[in-house]
Amino acid sequence: MNKELEKYKEKTFENIKHINEFGNEYWEARELMPTLGYNKWGNFKKVIDKAKIACEISGNNVKDCFADVGKSIISGKGKKDIIEDYHLSRYACYLIVQNADPRKNAVALGQTYFAVQTRKMELTEKEFSKLNEDEKRLYTRITVKNKNKFLFDTAKNSGVENFGKFNDYGYKGLYGGETAKMIAQRKGIDPNKEEILDYMGSEELAANLFRITQTDGILKKRNIKDENSACNTHHQVGKAVRQTIEKIGGTMPEKLPTPKKSIKDLEKEELNKIEKQK
């Protein structure tokens, strides 16, 4: 990051930082929202909710990191209303920017800024092993979602216009010829309403995460600039991941069980648990 960008980053997030009566720093969610490129509270609240789940999984106290406060505003008719807001710790802000849209320039700046002097979100192998299966699914799904955004941006720069086709090439490599629609049918879900990644266990998600990150890296390394080459690369990587699973004696992804609860169900349960702790 060059000096100008560094200076802008510091100015942007330092300007909205607050210090309470005890000398502790905090950020207001309503002020952080436009700084990260969001203009609707409903959309930003979804990011906050995912960050709360990540906070819970990481073993931190959600109430300490996301202090629920109300902000008083004067409506157009002069009526005084209380709107939802949060006082956020540095770690809470870090988790928010990790779960925000990484394609927004302000989010990329925030990820760098809040990483400074903040515990990294990534769990160690030992910490991850202590999570139960639902927690592993939630943690890995968040990572898959973020990495997929980067992959699709890379694919676009590589000449991809038909992202459904590009996606299917990767799945066919990893799943022995199955397309996304075929995987959805096997899992018994409607691909038009639900995401197949939301109905994968942690092991299956991990295999797809490896496919995604490796494809992203190879597309960049080879500087691919046409759709067919990008799709074939995605297929080759998926197939290579499948061959690795077979070589080490693992279970093929299509043979892994489909969880009864979707990721969205687990997220609702986690949020309800957090709400009850208030």
Image (cartoon, grey):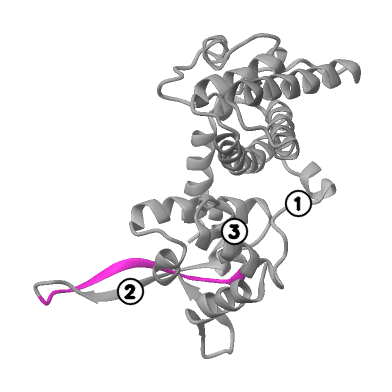
Please, what is the three-letter code of the amino acid marked with disc 3?
Answer: Leu
Q: Quadrant of residue 220?
A: top right
Q: Residue furthest left?
A: 77
| In-image side of 73 versus 23 (left or right) | left
What residue would you read off at disc 1?
123
How far, Cα to Cα, is label 1 from label 3?
Answer: 13 Å
Position in image of residue 24 (x %, y %): 59, 84
Label 2 neighbourhood size at 10 Å, few (<14), some (14-19), many (20+)?
few
Q: Main secondary structure of the magenta part?
A: strand
Which sits earlier in the primary sequence, circle 1 or circle 2?
A: 2
- SS state under label 1: loop
Q: Which residue sits at x=67%, y=30%?
A: 205
Q: Which residue sits at x=57%, y=23%?
A: 166
Up-down relation of residue 107 to residue 177 (above or below): below
Q: Which residues are magenta?
A: 78-90
Q: Which residue sits at x=75%, y=51%?
A: 123
Residue 19 is a magenta residue: no
Regarding residue 106, the answer to whether it shows in the image is yes
